[in-house]
Amino acid sequence: MIKIVTIIGARPQIIKAAALSRAIKNNFSNEIQEIIVHTGQHYDANMSGVFFDELQIPQPNYNLNVGSGSHAKQTATMLTGIEEILVKEKPQAIVLYGDTNSTLAGAMAAAKIHVPIAHIEAGLRSFNKTMPEEINRISCDHASTFLFSPTKAGFDNLVVEGFKTDTKSPYNINNPKIYHCGDVMYDNSLHFANIAEQKSEILKKYNLQNYNFILATIHRDNNTDIPKRLNALFSALFEIHQKNNTAVILPLHPRTKKCVNEYLDKNLLEKISASKQFIICEPLPFLDMIMLEKNCSLVMTDSGGVQKEAFYFDKPCIILRPETEWVELLSCGAAVLADADKDKVIAAYNNFATNKPSFPKLFGDGQAAEFICNELIKNLA
C-alpha cells in the first residue's frame, strides 16, 4: 500500500479533493492510504467546513489553522507545518491541487526534503505573472514529479516549458512524467449533479424555479479591492438586470462583501438592495452552486472553477478578467473575456442572448481521479 499526503486549504481544493478521495474509497482502499492536511487557508465555515460533510470528504487528519494573512506569512506558516507532517508521515508522494498559497507551500516543503509531488491541474497558464496564482502554479509544476493536466492546452504548455513527453520510469523531480488526464472537477460535476437535484433547495429558497437568472461570482482581489473595477462590474450587472428583466444571484465572498460596503457607489448599492430580483447571498455550498449552474441562463465570474462548471452544464460564461487559464472555453466560443469593462460585459451578454454557443467535450470522460490513482500506484508501489 502506498501512502499519499493530500494538501487542501481553499474552497476549490476541497471540492477537487472529493474526486480523488471518492475514487480511493470506492476502488483503491487496499492500495492507497490518504492522509489529508487542511492548511486552514479558508477557515470560514461556509467557505470550508460544511464542504466536508456535503461532499463526503474524510475529515482532515491535520489542520494547520493558518487563517488569513499576507502571502508571505501564510506560506511560511504552511511550509513549517507541512514539512513537519511529511517528516512524520513519510509518504510516497504529496498531492497538490491548483495554484493557491497552500499549493506553493506544499510544493516547496516537499521538494526540499525529496518527497515526490503529484500536481493536479498542472500546465494551466494565464501568462500573467502579476497574478500570485501564476507564480504558484509555475513553481509547483517545476518542482513536481507527476504532472496531471486536465486539458490538451495545459499539456502543450508544459511541453513548451521544456517538459519531455517521452520520459521513462522511474520518475523523479529531474525526470518528471506529464499527463493529459481530464479534469477531476468534471468527475465531480457528473457525480454531484444528481445529488444536487435531490438535496438542494436553493431555487425554491430564492424563487428562481421558473425564472431566467444570471449566476455571478466576484472574488479576485484585483476586482474587489479596486473601486473603479468593482463599481464597473456591479453597474454592468445591475443594468443588465434592469433592462432585460432577468434575475441575478450573487453569492458574496467575504472579501467582496467588505469591499462592496466600503467602495461601491452608495446610490448604486441602494438600487441593488431595493431590487427583489437582484439577490445577494452568503457563500453557497457546492450542491447549491451546481443547482444554480444547471438552471441559470448565463454565468458571469472571475473564478476559474466556476468558468469550467458553467461549461460542464452548457451555460455561456462572461469572464470578468483580462485573461483565463481555460483558453479552450474561448476558442469554442462558450466564454468571452470582458475584464471589468462595463461595455464589454453588456455586449457579451447581448451576444449570448441571441447566439447559443457549442459545448464540445474538452475535459475528459469523468474518470480522471481513477486514472490518477492508477498512475500513482503503478509508479510508487
Image: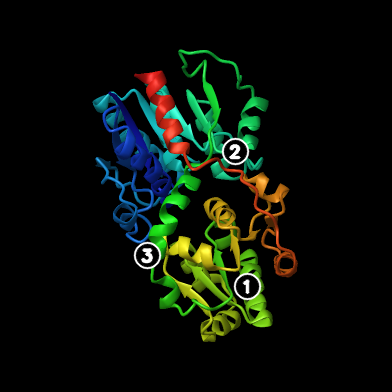
What's the mark number on residue 198?
3
What's the mark number on residue 150?
none
Assign a secondary structure to mark 1.
Answer: helix
Image position of 315 with respect to 304: above or below: below
Identify which residue is drawn at 61% across, 78% down. Answer: 246
Q: Closer to the N terminus: mark 3 or mark 1?
A: 3
Residue 217, image x and y in percent? 54, 63
Closer to the camera in the image, 379 or 125: 379
Q: Is residue 310 left or right of residue 257?
A: right
Residue marked by disc 1: 237
Residue marked by disc 2: 151
Identify which residue is drawn at 40% across, 20% down. Answer: 378
- The answer to whether residue 144 is visible is no
Residue 212, image x and y in percent? 59, 75
Identify which residue is drawn at 38% across, 30% down. Answer: 94
- Alpha-carbon span between mark 2 and mark 3: 31 Å
